[in-house]
Image: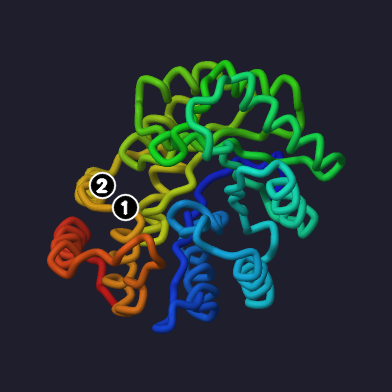
Amino acid sequence: MSRGTRFGLSAALTTPFDAEGRVDLPRLVAHARDCLAKGCDTVTIFGTTGEGASLSRDERTAIFEALIGGGVAPDRLVCAVSETSIGEAVLRARTALEADAAAVLILPPFYFKGPSDAGVFDWYAAVFNGLGAAARDVLLYHIPSVTEVPLSLALVRRLADAFPGVVRGVKDSGCDWAATEKLLAGRGDLEILVGDERDLARAVRNGGAGAISGMGNVCPARIRRLAVDGVDDPAVYELVDAVVKVPVTPAVKALVAHVTGDAAWGRTRAPLEPTPAAAAAALAEVHDRVFPDARPG
């Protein structure tokens, strides 16, 4: 995906595990290929939905290599970076960018809570300077429910102005439409990607560039209409309403298990736990009711 190409839809790829808790590389590759075939422009690996913070460096390397070896071009991959160390963040981002990944999605440093905008700016600036000539296509990840380190519009604009050609955009997973509106209004040439599918179509109608979407694992063709065409889909919104009532990452995996007919997708890695059977059945019921033409398996 070239910088001149609108971002579109990326599935926030979920990570399958085998019965021994190891990353199931064949399942992951097949799922990535399926998401791309069904409407995703890219897939995002190592993110929140992918339990990226629970994956070791060796596992991340194995995943990247398996995807490339399985026929997924590097420019169809977005790589999330969740590190508190500047040095580790530089290493992970450089590895992805030098392998021609489409973009890197970089979380702010999340261990120390409540840092100032100035402190977070200094952290990102050190990462970008550490990347040197490799720095490009950076997406800033605003997900305060996880990091407790929000990215203000003033901070985003300061980073974009200080590092032109480096900061490409923002993944806004704040789930706060009023804040999203301000981000869209002040975006300039930045690409704003909205994580909450219920706000996605209206964001696109107001200048949003697409999404990195957990539900892209489940119904990518339907999510594409929101993320690319800006068309509302009440069925998607009803399913998302059901998903957010339980822990979201296990819920997405439960839905992937349902739509594929492969129960192994329900496995998670500690500290996350699989969606309980009753809750998974309730999610499946909502899915089948709002998408009556979809056939699991």
> In the shown orientation, is residue 146 left or right of residue 128?
left
- Residue 183 visible in image: yes
* Residue at figure coordinates x 66%, y 35% from the top left: 168
Query: Could you classify mark 1 by the number of other residues whose Cα lies within 10 Å: few (under 14), some (14-19), or many (20 or more)?
Result: some
Q: Is residue 21 above or below residue 196?
A: below
Nearer the observer, 48 or 53: 53
> In the shown orientation, is residue 66 left or right of residue 145?
right
Taking the view exactly as shown, the residue that stands out farthest to the right is: 133
Q: Is residue 277 above or below residue 117?
A: below
Q: Secondary structure at mark 1?
A: helix
Nearer the observer, 14 or 110: 110
- Residue that carries the numbered disc 2 in the rendered image: 244
Taking the view exactly as shown, the residue that stands out farthest to the bottom is: 19
Spatial CA distance of label 1 from label 2 is 6 Å
Residue type of the residue flagged with mark 2: Val
Residue 16 x %, y % = 44, 72
* Residue at figure coordinates x 53%, y 81% from the top left: 26
Q: Is residue 280 above or below residue 161?
A: below
* Residue at figure coordinates x 40%, y 53% from the top left: 214
- Residue that carries the numbered disc 1 in the rendered image: 248
* Residue at figure coordinates x 37%, y 30% from the top left: 202
Mark sitting on residue 214:
none
Residue 124 x %, y % = 68, 32
Q: Is residue 239 above or below residue 116?
A: below
Residue type of the residue flagged with mark 1: Val
Q: Quadrant of the C terminus?
A: bottom left
Q: Are marks 1 and 2 in contact (CB under 8 Å)?
A: yes
